[in-house]
Amino acid sequence: MPKQMFSHNTQIGPNPMQLHLVSMLNFNNTEETQTRLKSALEYFYVSEFERTKDRLFANGTITEEMIEQGANTHFSTAYLL
């Protein structure tokens, strides 16, 4: 079974990839570099989301009806006083 893309991580502290990204920022930490890196990471995660969404639609895990139901659902949490 393939590893889940967005699974819950129980690790405390940064993982090796996060540490690597931080060390990369030390190399050339200009505002332009930060903006370009942010754009690259956003593109990566949007692409992964789209790929996962397409797979879930293709195998019937989610449907348009489910999306519509979710769009009309209020997800706020009631707070206890």
Image: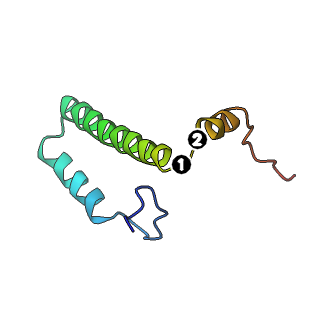
Q: Residues within 10 Å of mark 1 (few under 14, many from 20)?
A: few
Q: Residues within 10 Å of mark 2 (few under 14, many from 20)?
A: few
Q: Is residue 11 above or below residue 38?
A: below
Q: Residue furthest front?
A: 59
- Which quadrant of the view contains residue 63? top right
Q: Residue at x 37, y 43 (%)?
A: 51
Is residue 80 toward the left or the right of residue 24 in the image? right
Q: Residue furthest right?
A: 81
Q: Position of residue 66 (x, y in %)?
A: 64, 40
| Residue identified by numbered label 2 | 63
At label 2, which amino acid type do we have? Thr
Cα–Cα gap, marks 1 and 2: 6 Å
| Tag 1 near tag 2, CB within 8 Å | yes
Q: Secondary structure at mark 2?
A: loop
Which residue occupies the foreground of this view, 44 or 14?
A: 44
Q: Which mark is residue 19?
A: none
Q: Secondary structure at mark 1?
A: loop
